[in-house]
Image (cartoon, rainbow, N blue to C red):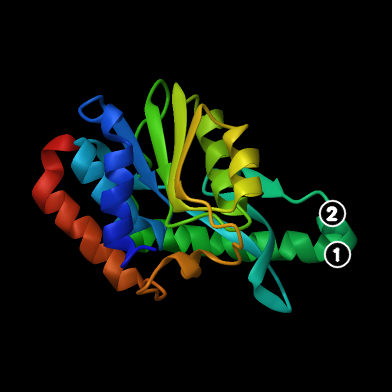
Amino acid sequence: MFEDRKDAGEKLARALKRYKDRDVLVLAIPRGGVEVGYQVAKYLAASFSLLVTRKLPFPDNPEAGFGAIAEDGSTFIFKDAERWLPRETIVEIMKEQKQEIKRRIAKLRKGRPLPEIEGKMVVLVDDGIAMGSTMRAAIMLCKNKKAMKIIVAVPVSGEDVAEEIGEMVDEIVVLEKPVFFRAVAQAYRNWYDVSDHEVIEILTRWHEQYLSHI
């Protein structure tokens, strides 16, 4: 159990100690992954930015998703999705999420491009992995951009999903794999939806304090 995302990030950072001062790039998945990623990047003296991916939500159940899309268009869709939804609905939802990705890049990253990924050791961070679709889309983006090494690092995940994602990357670090895992929120005492404002505050803090690492 973690107190909050700051606590989870500090613990995750210590588990990644071997990457300290090794010129790694930490990419956090907003919004929940940003505080966690900030703590990891600070501890590792790493470069830090946001990698924007969006879940593709079911129209009648937005909490659940049938896949995800990353900011470069990399798309992961669960193989049964077309049995659940008509193709035109899938296309429409993807279009909506591409618009939200553009909005988040403009607002949260102030329109800045992703840092150079080619040839880098990349640590992908989120506050946890449930179905894992957004993380898979992020991994696909890093592969497309020819990252030298991809490490996925999260405080909590289910065992099966962690295993599947572990097969896609060079290394996966998960602090907690609860036996009865239902949602990322169950691993946190203080859980809430992170706002755009909080993400912008964290990034402003990073730029002020650690600009020399970027």
- Please rate how many residues cluster around mark 2, counting C-alpha atoms within 10 Å: few if below 14, some from 14 to 19, many from 20: few
* Relative side of 206 to 127, left or right: left
- Please rate how many residues cluster around mark 1, counting C-alpha atoms within 10 Å: few if below 14, some from 14 to 19, many from 20: few
* Relative side of 95 to 138, left or right: right
The amino acid at mark 1 is: Trp
Element at badge 1?
helix
If the image is split into quadrants, where does the C terminus sit?
top left
**Looking at the rendering, which quadrant does residue 16 occupy?**
top left
Mark number, residue 178: none
Mark number, residue 80: 2
- For this orientation, the residue located farthest to the bottom is 60
User: Foreground residue, 187 or 36?
Assistant: 187
- Distance of mark 1 from mark 2, alpha carbons? 7 Å
Q: Are marks 1 and 2 in contact (CB under 8 Å)?
A: yes
* Relative side of 167 to 178, left or right: right
Q: Is residue 66 above or below residue 152?
A: below
Rendering coords of residue 193 (x, y %): 42, 74
Q: Is residue 61 above or below residue 188?
A: below
Mark number, residue 84: 1
The amino acid at mark 2 is: Asp
Rendered residue at 54%/57% (across/down): 178
Rendering coords of residue 150 (x, y %): 47, 30
If the image is split into quadrants, where does the N terminus sit?
bottom left
Q: Is residue 191 above or below residue 146?
A: below
Rendering coords of residue 69 (x, y %): 60, 51
Rendered residue at 61%/32% (across/down): 168
